[in-house]
Image (cartoon, rainbow, N blue to C red):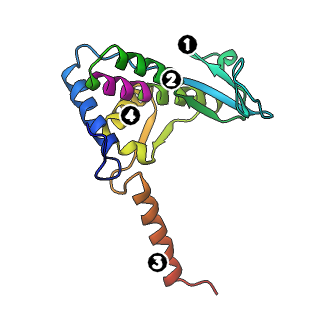
Amino acid sequence: MSRRASYEGQGAIAIEAIAAEFLSASKQSPCIPYPFSITCEKEIGRVEKVESGRVGEWESRRITNYQLPITDSQLPIPNSPFLLDSRPMWQALIADLQQGLCKVEIAARFHVGLARSIVQMTDVLYHHHPFTHVALTGGVFQNLVLQQQVTQHLTAMGFTVLSHHIVPPNDGGLSLGQAAIAAARAIFPQK
């Protein structure tokens, strides 16, 4: 991999490619995913230093190591946004780099860990407001490894997964939508 990018997303595409290669070669012995935590953030007053879960102007209540199915006592505070906390992933990734683990396996562990955390987040949200369909959109789902991992696990859990097939999930899709609205306004001007 290079320290310089010739085009936008080059690093992410390179990491996706080596992760795909590793995962395809290691189907019999899947890699250990990097850990992410699901947090529920509730705004509080500004806190100057990090102590007992308080960081900056947010206090987090972390859900970690919950067992499926999730019980009500494991759910975060209702009506607060759920976030993926990447700190445990970074700690594990840096430790792997320091121990000299090959970058191909690190890339795979990252992808599998992120996919797993998205699936877990979906499960947490499902326990708050049951649903049957999950739409995978946004530029992150141009990453085929991530999209396939998430789709496979959500489908196995019984969800119907919706994803892009013609219009890209990234800003290209937004641009197409903006062009469609502009065309509609030009064709049917408001009086």
Amino acid type for the residue under numbered disc 2: Phe
Tag shown at residue 183 = 3
**Residue, far left:** 25
Q: Is residue 73 left or right of residue 132?
A: right
Q: Residues within 10 Å of mark 2 (few under 14, many from 20)?
A: many
Helix, strand or loop under label 3: helix
Reading the image, the residue beneath label 2 is: 36
Reading the image, the residue beneath label 4 is: 151
Structural distance between the alpha carbons of marks 4 and 2:
18 Å
Q: In the image, residue 178 lies at what x, y percent?
A: 48, 68
Disc 3 versus disc 2: nearer the observer: 2
Q: 53 or 61, which is in the foreground?
A: 53
Amino acid type for the residue under numbered disc 4: Thr
Q: In the image, residue 81 lies at what x, y percent?
A: 66, 36
Structural distance between the alpha carbons of marks 4 and 1:
22 Å
Q: Residue at x 36, y 37 (%)?
A: 147
Amino acid type for the residue under numbered disc 1: Asn
